[in-house]
Image: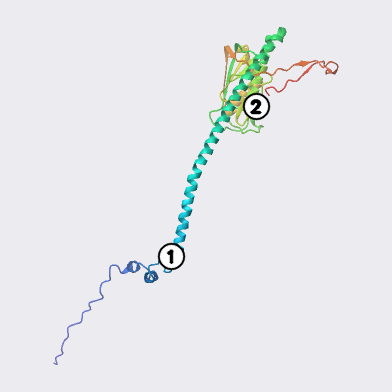
Amino acid sequence: MCGMSQQPPVRSTGSPPPRPDASMSLLNNVIDHALDDGYAEATARRAAEGGGTPRSLRAKLGVAVGLLLAAAVVTVGGAEARVSAPVVAKERQELIDRIEAESSGADDLEQDIERIRAEVGERQRQALQEHGGDQAELVALLSGATPVHGPGVRLVVDDAKGTDTGGGGPRESSGFSDTGRVRDRDMQRVVNGLWESGAEAVAINGQRLTSLSAIRAAGDAILVDNKPLVPPYTVLAIGNGQKLSTAFQDSADGQYLHALVESFGIRSSISAEGDVRLPAAPSLTVRTAEPRGAGATPSGRATADTGKGTS
C-alpha cells in the first residue's frame, strides 16, 4: 500500500467583518470633506492673490471713497434729524394748543346757547301766562311751558335680554331688522296711545313732550326733539292713574306693545302712581291759528300750522 502524503485540510477563514459605519458612507464623506473642492481651490487662490483685498491703488481709493460717502450720508442724516426734531415738536405743540383753544371756545359757545335757550323759554312762558287769558293755565299745560304734577301712570319699556329674536309679529313689514331692540316707532305708538287714552302731559326719561315734539331715530338710538335717550325708557303720564292704565292697555297701541313683549321679548311694565312729576319742556315752539275769513274752508274751520307731531 503506497503511502500518500496527507496535507492538512485548508479551512476558509471567511471575509473580514463589515465596519459598523459601512452604511454611513455618505455621512462619512461629508464629514471627511466638509468643504467642497471648488471652495478649497477658491480659498487657496484668494490667499495666493493677497487675501482678497484690492491690489491696485485705484481699487483701494475706490473702497475708501465709498466708505467716506456712506459715513457722510449717515452723518448728514443724523444732523438733519437733530435739527428738525425741535421744529416738529414745536409744530406739534402748537397744533395741540390750537385744538385745546378751539375746544374751549366750542364749550363756551355751547354754554351761551344753553343760557340763551333758557332765557327764551322763560320769556315764552311769561308771555303765555300774561296773554293766555282765561285759558292761560291750559295753554301752559298743553305747550309744556310749566312743570306739572299729579296722579298718573309709570310705563317702563326696555330692550329684550337677548339679541336677535324670531321674525313675524307687528314688525314683519318694517325695514328694520327684527331684533329685541325698542325702536323709535314703538315709542311713537306708546306715546300716542297714552295721549289718546286721556293723558294730560307726557315725558320720556325726563324729556317733556308737547304736541310738536318729534320722536325719531339715529341709527339704533332714539331721539326726542333731537336729544338721545338710553334704555330703559320710562314714560310718565299725568291723568287718572288706574283709568289711564286700563284704557291704554285696552287700546290698539297697548295691544301693539303687548305683541312686542310676546313676540320679541321686549320688557314692559305699567303701574298707576299717586303723584307723578314732569318738568317743563326745555324749549317752546308756540304756533297760533286764525280764521281765513272769506277764504275759509267750507266747514268754516280755521287752519293752523301745527308742525310735526310725535308720529
Give the residue at the far bottom of this rendering: 2
Task: State whether residue 119 appears in this view.
Answer: yes
| Residue to which mark 2 is pinned | 216
The amino acid marked with disc number 2 is Arg
Q: Residues within 10 Å of mark 1 (few under 14, many from 20)?
A: few
Percent of width and height locating residue 304: 76, 19
- Disc 2 on helix, strand or loop? strand
The amino acid marked with disc number 1 is Lys
- Disc 1 on helix, strand or loop? helix
Q: Quadrant of residue 250?
A: top right
Q: Which mark is residue 60?
A: 1
Percent of width and height locating residue 55: 41, 69
Q: Would you say the residues marked 2 and 1 are in contact, meaning their CB atoms lie under 8 Å apart?
A: no
Q: How is the image coloured?
A: rainbow
Residue closest to the eye, 28 or 126:
126
Residue closest to the eye, 64 or 252:
64
Which callout, 2 or 1, points at the residue further toward the start of the chain? 1
Q: Residues within 10 Å of mark 2 (few under 14, many from 20)?
A: many
Task: State whether residue 282 appears in this view.
Answer: no
Residue at 45% in and 62% down: 63
- Whole-number angstrom distance, CA of label 2 to CA of label 1: 82 Å
Residue at 43% in and 67% down: 57
Percent of width and height locating residue 79: 48, 48
Give the residue at the far right of this rendering: 294
Give the residue at the far top of this rendering: 134
Residue at 46% in and 60% down: 66
